[in-house]
Image (tube, coloured by chain):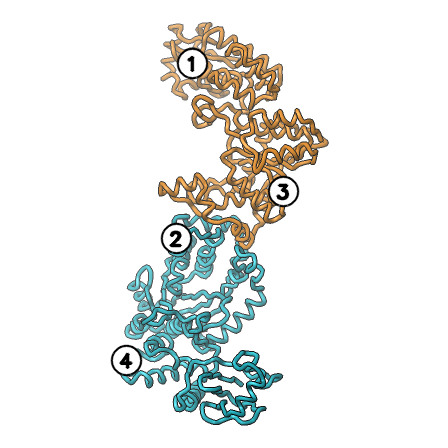
Chain colours: A cyan, B orange
Amino acid sequence: MITDKQKIKEILDRGIIADILPSRKEFEKELLAGKKLKIYLGVDPTAPDLHLGHSQNYLLLEDFRRLGHKIIILIGDFTACIGDPSDRSSARQQLSTEEVKTNAKYWLKLIKPLLNFDDKKNPPEVVFNRKWLSKLNFEQVIELAANFTVQQMIERDMFAKRLKNNEPIYMHEFFYPLMQGYDSVQLEVDAELCGTDQTFNALAGRTLLKRYKNKDKFVITTHLVANPKTGELMSKSKGTGIFLSWPAEKMYGAIMATPDEMTEVFLIRCTRLPLDKIKKILKKNPLEAKMITAQEIVSIYHGPQKAEEAKKYFRQTFQEKKLPTDLPELSLKKNKSLPEILVDNSIISSKNDWRRLIKEGAIKLNGEEKITAENFRPNETCVLKIGKKRFVRIKI
Amino acid sequence: MITDKQKIKEILDRGIIADILPSRKEFEKELLAGKKLKIYLGVDPTAPDLHLGHSQNYLLLEDFRRLGHKIIILIGDFTACIGDPSDRSSARQQLSTEEVKTNAKYWLKLIKPLLNFDDKKNPPEVVFNRKWLSKLNFEQVIELAANFTVQQMIERDMFAKRLKNNEPIYMHEFFYPLMQGYDSVQLEVDAELCGTDQTFNALAGRTLLKRYKNKDKFVITTHLVANPKTGELMSKSKGTGIFLSWPAEKMYGAIMATPDEMTEVFLIRCTRLPLDKIKKILKKNPLEAKMITAQEIVSIYHGPQKAEEAKKYFRQTFQEKKLPTDLPELSLKKNKSLPEILVDNSIISSKNDWRRLIKEGAIKLNGEEKITAENFRPNETCVLKIGKKRFVRIKI
């Protein structure tokens, strides 16, 4: 167990943690005492993909793991298989156990660069909550529920708002805190890590763990990763997500396409760089600082060599040729020609359009080279400039 | 199947039924159509005893049974075994399966005079809901719950009141309508009979039966038996209950001790007399009408002979000697003397007190005969008059 005061302080004060309940001081004391703690993070395997906003929790868990603590990743497959039964159509879209397993596998692959699963002495453990939740019977569910009042539930922000707006709250929605809470009882954890939006559910687990096992659980909350100016969250639906599954060049380019105010956020929450180094980087000019950030992050997921190559590619295709970094991306498919793909995706209107553009010399490769062959097919990822304003990235 | 229009009308209009949901007319149609209906009544086996107020539902069920319909008595042993887990002390007092079975047995014995269990062609069926409710798992409970909104629950009278008064509603209390409702699904009933206080739960069952089996259930509600002047309900705790377990004499005396305005209520709700006969009885003087009522009711539980004897006993010990009918009752125990029992129950202060009273001729048997022997021990049920004002019934 590592109990270095400076190291512990750096972890707790880095800027990832929003709050520690019921007491930050008490939690710090436990870390300093060198007692091996069980710390867990629960995740919803229905999420299709993970983005940089999710990475901070795993980096933080890895920090605790390196101190010597036991890390548990809980995959909420029980909840995922239930889906949302209030909505008939989505009830039909419930995930099967098989699908959840496939998702979880994919998703553990994504977080592998963040948490050292290969450590033989103290590897993180992965557990699935269907194992115990599916076994609870009606009597046990009633016993669980009896620990909470309806008033406690409806005082919760999201429920209070819906009550006020006369929007239905389905009764089973009250079960989610119970389910999540019972996970804590089953795992007998010392601490739970979660986003601030999950505080209510995590505290429900604190209550249950105290009632069932007379054990106190800390709740460590983290702020969601947001743009400090606009408050906008990283989100797939809004097109602002930078996903862990992306290849090096795309990830690098996407980070470079974010506003400058995100650089500090990324450095603190998405890299392992120590705070003093981060301070120095932020003193450089914004573009340089952002490039260091991008290279650092890409390096975590793809290694330093690919990160270096990604930087080069970015310089050549975007920076030097003044191309936009934020542009649509299409994959080159084996059974389709390049113009066919462009037509399918409404980039151009027809194959005739393509021929006309080629003749006019209006299609350029990586912002420079005019394409002259009608049957042109790129053999590496590139950016096409079509006319004066249209850009598209073609992925191999 | 009996579909006699007059008979059916007499049952529905007698004055026991408060309402039939969603439509009395539709229910009457079903009865007239001669379709064999499944009608059930759910009961809570934690109730220690049954009183006359409970009898109306069984009399009504027997009416339906005699028409040819299937009657089901559901014993809520699942709920009984769960108890009320919000209250730690009562949680410890949960009934065991064994206790519930013992209670149910006792209690079926009490209703035997009301429902003909010996009919071989169409006997009432007795079922226990632990059989199916204990088998529901968490996933199925969630599915059940998803059929209701929190808003529907908190609009319920009793919950709305407690919310308003800031009294806690424990989450598991929301489960009771689900449990009771699922009984309807399991039994696939056509109708449920219940007190008006159970309407909400019965309608929850209607919703679930429709959702799960696409079947419509009628809800037949009955008013609780109350004093028409004061609105007071028959209740054990208030000492106004007349219990089905009581011996003939005591039951007769207790009915005679009720206010005159209860006579019509008893005739309609606690006897099988037809309405025209009831009208005639109510034209007699109040005492006579009440005595006919008492004899009629006692006759249901103890047979006509015992009812006749109870009337005689009442005449001799109360009416002719002007004794009060409402008086404490003590049982004569084998290992104790009469004065010991009186001292134990604080009727007299000591054995010396007893001796003094005997000497003074202040203790009278059945209001007349002075007791002179200090070791007096009655050999049949009697009333002792002690001094001028104290009365006690000694039961053999």
Q: Position of residue B55 (x, y in %)?
A: 56, 27
Q: Which residue is mark 4?
A: A279
Name which residue type carries label 1: Phe
A287 left or right of B194 in image: left
Q: SS at mark 2?
A: helix
Instruction: Say which of B78 and A331 sits in front.
Output: A331
What is the chain identity of the residue bearing mark 1?
A: B
Q: CA distance from mark 2 to mark 3?
A: 37 Å
Q: SS at mark 3?
A: helix
Residues at discs 3 and 4 in contact (Cβ within 8 Å): no
Other-residue count near label 1 (Cα within 10 Å), few / some / many at <14 / 14–19 / ≥20: many
Q: SS at mark 4?
A: helix
Name which residue type carries label 2: Ala
Q: Which residue is mark 1?
A: B391
Residue B187 image label: 3
Q: Position of residue A175 (x, y in %)?
A: 47, 54
